[in-house]
Image (cartoon, rainbow, N blue to C red):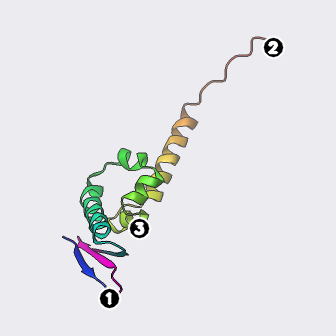
Amino acid sequence: MAYLRTLANGHFRADVRMKGIVKNKTFSSQLLAQAWADQIEHSIKTIPNLDQAQLLALSEAEIDGMGGEELFKQLGFDLFAIRCRWLSKSAYIRMRNPIAPPKNTFLK
């Protein structure tokens, strides 16, 4: 559950504390603050349930929309390491099973 409070300048601060993660941000309206807090809480709940294929499929925009790479790291997911592992594995597979180049029928 997020904590929203009004600041002296009329802005609103949203504080989210879940699973040892603390995030906060200031907004010009209470509606924006609540929407952000709800989105962060949802991400904290759903990110741990993603499998490796789903993590690899996330675009940079989707990662940012879910709270950013920092939130993933706080939840124990190093996206850079996951992507490097996948790339090195796919490079190894390509090395072991190279695609034969097409035969050139013009040169004999």
- Residue 94 or residue 8, whichever sits in front: 8
- Residue 90 or residue 40, whichever sits in front: 40
Give the numbered dot on residue 39: none
Amino acid residing under circle 1: Ala
Q: Nearer the viewer, mark 1 or mark 3?
A: 1
Give the numbered dot on residue 8: 1
In this view, the residue farthest toward the front is: 10
Counting residues from the start of the chain, the first of labels 2 and 3 encountered is 3
Distance, label 1 to label 2, CA atoms, is: 81 Å
Q: Mainly helix, strand or loop, the magenta region? A: strand
Q: Please give left or right for residue 4 compared with residue 82 in the image.
A: left
Give the percent coordinates (x, y) of residue 79: 43, 57
Q: In the rendered image, which residue does mark 2 sit on?
A: 107
Asked which secondary structure carries label 3, the reply is helix
Q: Please give left or right for residue 29 compared with residue 96 in the image.
A: left
Quadrant including the N terminus: bottom left
Magenta highlight range: 8-22
Badge 2 vs badge 3, beta-carbon distance below 8 Å? no
Q: Is residue 108 visible?
A: yes
Distance, label 2 to label 3, CA atoms, is: 56 Å
65 over 29 or under it: above or below: above
Amino acid residing under circle 2: Leu
Asked which secondary structure carries label 2, the reply is loop
Q: In the rendered image, which residue does mark 3 sit on?
A: 70
Amino acid residing under circle 3: Glu
- Residue 14 or residue 91, whichever sits in front: 14
37 over 81 or under it: above or below: below
- Locate residue 36: give its quadrant: bottom left
Query: Residue at left 49%, top 44%?
Result: 89
Badge 1 vs badge 3, beta-carbon distance below 8 Å? no
Q: Nearer the viewer, mark 2 or mark 3?
A: 3
